[in-house]
Image: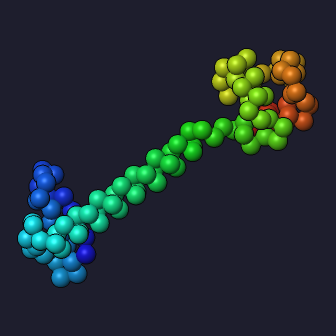
């Protein structure tokens, strides 16, 4: 069973499909209300899951994958270099100016390139 918004996406013009094809269900019936609520809930759930996945992808940085770079070092790097490309392309000497940046971290940063 499936329900789809009807012509011009107007309320109460939903089209209901079953294995037998298109079904006629009265707009005010309990079945119609149940089906529209189920459709709306499934849609809400899908939107919430999509937003959650998108939010996670926005907040995760390549810097988070490097052992030894936590929030403070990440902020210090971004404050000085302004972007990931600038950090990756920075010289070892410039990177060493950031407190706590070790040769191992520099090697890991260069490996991101």
Q: Quadrant of residue 45?
A: bottom left
Place residue 44 in its image quadrant. Answer: bottom left
Q: Place residue 76 in its image quadrant.
A: top right
In the picture shown, does residue 53 fall above or below 109?
below
Q: Position of residue 39 (x, y in %)?
A: 28, 63
> Residue 28, how many percent across, how many down?
9, 67
Give the position of the N terminus as an image quadrant.
bottom left
Q: Position of residue 48 (x, y in %)?
A: 43, 51
- 51 in relation to 59, above or below: below
Relative to residue 28, is residue 97 depicted above or below? above
The residue that appears at 18% across and 74% down in the rendered structure is 31
Which residue: 46% across, 47% down? 51
Q: Is residue 85 left or right of residue 110?
A: left
Q: Is residue 104 left or right of residue 75?
A: right
The image position of residue 49, as x and y in percent, is 46, 54
Colour logic: rainbow
In the displayed structure image, the side of residue 45 where residue 2 appears, left or right: left
Q: Residue at x 22, y 64 (%)?
A: 36
Is residue 86 shown left or right of residue 37?
right
- Which residue: 13% across, 75% down? 23
Q: How many marks?
A: 0
Quick one: 98 or 36, which is closer to the camera? 36
Q: Is 46 or 85 nearer to us in this picture?
A: 46
Asked whether residue 14 appears in the rendered view, the answer is yes
Which quadrant does the C terminus fall into?
top right
């Amino acid at each position: 069973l499936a329900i789809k918004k009807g012509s011009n996406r107007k309320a109460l013009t939903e089209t209901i499909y079953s294995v037998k094809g298109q079904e006629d269900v009265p707009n005010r019936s309990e079945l119609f209300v149940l089906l529209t609520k189920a459709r709306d809930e499934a849609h809400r759930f899908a939107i919430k899951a999509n937003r959650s996945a998108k939010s996670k992808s926005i907040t995760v940085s390549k810097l988070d994958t490097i052992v030894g770079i936590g929030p403070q070092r990440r902020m210090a790097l971004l404050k000085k270099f302004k972007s990931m490309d600038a950090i990756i392309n920075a010289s070892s000497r410039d990177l060493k100016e950031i407190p706590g940046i070790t040769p191992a971290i520099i090697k890991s940063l260069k490996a991101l390139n």
